Image (cartoon, rainbow, N blue to C red):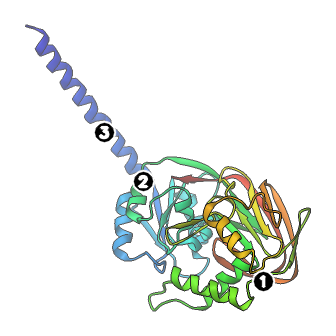
Amino acid sequence: MNTEPARSRSGAIVLRRSAVSCAVNARILALVRRVLIVNPFASAVDEERTHAVAAALRCAEIARTEHRGHATELAREACVHADELYVFSGDGGYNEVLNGVDAETPIGFVPGGGTSVLPRALGLPRDPVRAARRLAQGRTRRISVGRVNGRRFGFGAGIGLDAELVRRVDALGRSGSGKRAGDVRFALVALRLLGEHRGRFAPALELEGLGRAAFALVANCDPYSYAGPLALHVAPEARFERGLDVVAPVEVGPASLPRLATYLVLGRGQARARDVLYRHDLDSLEVRCDRPLPLQVDGEDLGDVTAASISCERGAVTVLV
């Protein structure tokens, strides 16, 4: 006779404790200072999505970039007072923030570009609001970043062919709303570039201690990039938690192009290919060019270089995943 009332009283106590716990958690969440840096000119960014992302992240402070390099400045300022930092942008914006963030402030990358390699490589969905909800759960991961000639990069850097491709796509300009050229135009530019060279790329640089190559790709993760939904596996062994991987075809000709393209899609073959220099988990690398060659980091053109000093900063950044 007395057991039922006892269970009821116990249940009430549990409910009250649960309610108190929820209230405490809500207050803690409200005290966490979150800053959202937004590039309003990124391909998938607009005001409606920005407010939806901010709501999903519970960000009260939104900072919009106004010029090249502004995201780096905003990241430095935010790290002084923010507990968590988020970036709603494309790969260029992520790169700028990586060059301004400290080692301790957790940073979350919300897909806002046409490709958004970094968040996708970290396992986030392409939809920005879904990605924001995932990031809001607060799970963190420590990752390495690369650095070339003083500039940090998150997923990759290239000297030669792919940097020339980035430059030519940039030369197409942006739409009236400031959006960059999409995947189709990117593919057309790539085909035109290959056609101009008739599919041939002779050795043009020296990787110190490794040998000569036509061009060099440096990866901090796998995939290296994406063509629409298709992942491109330049360096299939690369991992965010390890050092850098370098992949450098010694010489490229029309006969080898299909095989090299197959490596990109399947993610295997390049590590054992005799005409490809592949090194895994490097701390540093020196590259000397025969002539000035274009350099890109995370899809951003850094101009021509005759030499590149590349290094890995292991465990340098805390990211939200």
Q: Position of residue 40 (x, y in %)?
A: 46, 78
Which residue is farthest top? 1
Do the CB atoms of the residues marked 1 and 2 lie less than 8 Å apart? no
Residue marked by disc 3 = 22
In the rendering, which numbered label is found on residue 93?
none
Q: Secondary structure at mark 2?
A: helix
Tag 1 residue:
200
Residue lying at 68% horizontally and 74% vertically, measured from the top left: 258
Q: Which amino acid is tagged 1?
A: Arg
Q: Position of residue 153 (x, y in %)?
A: 67, 66
- The answer to which of 12 and 81 lies nearer the viewer is 12
Residue for badge 2: 134
Secondary structure type for disc 1: loop
Query: Which mark's residue is nearer the viewer, 3 or 2?
Result: 2
Kind of residue sitting beneath label 2:
Arg
The residue that appears at 63% across and 75% down in the rendered structure is 299
Local packing at callout 2 (Cα closer than 10 Å; few below 14, some 14-19, many 20+) is: some
